[in-house]
Image (cartoon, rainbow, N blue to C red):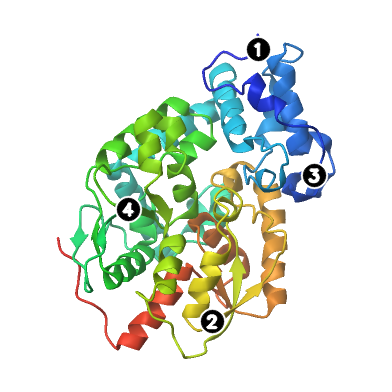
Amino acid sequence: MGYVTAEAPTRVELATCVQCGLCLPHCPTFRLTGLETASPRGRLMAMSAVLEGFAEVDDVFVEIIDFCLGCRACEAVCPGLTPYGRVLEGARAEIATQHPTPSRRLRRWVLGRALATRGFVSAATAVAAVVQRLGATWILPAAVRRSFTGLRPLAGRERWIGRSAEPVADPLGTAALLAGCVMDPWFSSVHEATVGLLRRAGYRVVVPEAQTCCGALAAHDGHASEARRMARRNVAAFAGFDLIVADAAGCSAHLKEYGHWAGDVGGAMAERVRDVTEVVAELIADGRLPRSELPRGPVAVQDPCHLRHAQRVVEAPRTILRAAGYEPVEIDQDAMCCGAAGTYAILRPDTSLELGRRKADQVRAAGSTVVASANPGCEMQLRSLLGPAYRVAHPVELYWEAVVEMAGRVPAEVDR
């Protein structure tokens, strides 16, 4: 039958792969298995086989495509500039259409509808907070339990959506912050650091009420119509702002690709999107944010895939950590995926755990009990495997603590 959706990988996209194999040593699943079908090259060949009518979107094809983490490490080394992330999402859109299962239908609702509904997220967070406080993780499915142990203490409510804050320095412009589906209720202290730093640099910060989930998780799982709906809503919510900031690497990477999901207006919005590490590093370089003279010791740096491979942002987190007084310690020159990969840790727990253990071992070998990671899924994966003896935090959180210490006080509360 071939492909039937508009999202399907195209012949032009697939032809950019020259089968050179340079991607193979950079692919986590190929490194684990040594199988060609577990490599980017093998997956692209499978996509081409379906396109040309030599194969179908069947169980074999689904297994080949779904085993991929979507880390996009292959893109960073591809001489043909194959848009692997795009074609992977297209192949999964075909699977969602041609090969629906109860699990995939449930994920369509959760990732495409529920996460875009703040009432659902708030209710789920409140329940999770009770489970966390009672230590009742035994009630959770086994596939969810390990990731759940990597959560920060939950407050059970949103804190930032719909709020704004005035600058505390010479005005620089207006920045809009993506609250995210779970960043607000689960990682609100990252937002606190982001807002505090932007204000100190001179930005007025707004967290638009009308925004929704960025749509990354839905897009990665093949739910294209839901991803487009969320993109269109965010394009409207973030219209008119000088700068759009996301403080989760997976979100910032997806927002930068809104040209695909929302056409020309999405592309115009994408040009104003920056990951918070990019913005803060530039503000430090410009002298709008200070550098600490107090040494704080080593910090192990974990590179989220969608920051390093998808956005090519490597030096910015290290610049921020040095400005906070830390000495960044490299743990993995290849920046292999930690195994979290959105829903992958739940859907493929064995593979996720193996990759996570390797990353945790790298952190232990680095000799630092402080770990910097700029993505929530990576943070949860590392915390669940490293245990309470290690602190895992966003680079801007570590830097914000240094800024507050230098200032000797916490700036005034944001406005309602």
Q: Would you say 325 lies left or right of 327 here? A: left
Q: Which circle's residue, 3 or 2, is located before the other in the chain?
A: 3
Residue lying at 52% horizontally and 87% vertically, measured from the top left: 296
Q: Nearer the viewer, residue 172 or 2?
A: 172
Residue type, mark 4 in image:
Leu
Nearer to us of marks 2 and 1 is 2
Residue lying at 38% horizontally and 51% vertically, measured from the top left: 182
Q: Which circle's residue, 2 or 1, is located before the other in the chain?
A: 1
Residue located beneath label 1 in the image? 2
Q: Position of residue 99 (x, y in %)?
A: 59, 20
Residue type, mark 1 in image:
Gly
How much space separates mark 4 and mark 2, taking CA atoms? 28 Å
Residue type, mark 2 in image:
Tyr
For the view shown, which residue lies furthest in the top direction?
1
For the view shown, which residue lies furthest in the left direction?
416
Q: Position of residue 258 (x, y in %)?
A: 42, 37
Tag 2's secondary structure?
strand
Question: In the rendered view, would you say 327 is above or below 381?
Answer: below
How much space separates mark 2 and mark 1, taking CA atoms? 53 Å
Q: Nearer the viewer, residue 344 or 413?
A: 413
Q: Would you say 275 lies left or right of 301 here? A: left
Residue located beneath label 4 in the image? 243
Tag 4's secondary structure?
strand
Question: In the rendered view, would you say 68 is above or below 294?
Answer: above
Tag 3's secondary structure?
loop
How much space separates mark 3 and mark 4, taking CA atoms? 36 Å
Residue located beneath label 3 in the image? 22
Residue located beneath label 2 in the image? 326
Q: Position of residue 353 (x, y in %)?
A: 67, 54
How much space separates mark 4 and mark 1, taking CA atoms? 42 Å
Tag 1's secondary structure?
loop
How much space separates mark 3 and mark 2, taking CA atoms? 34 Å
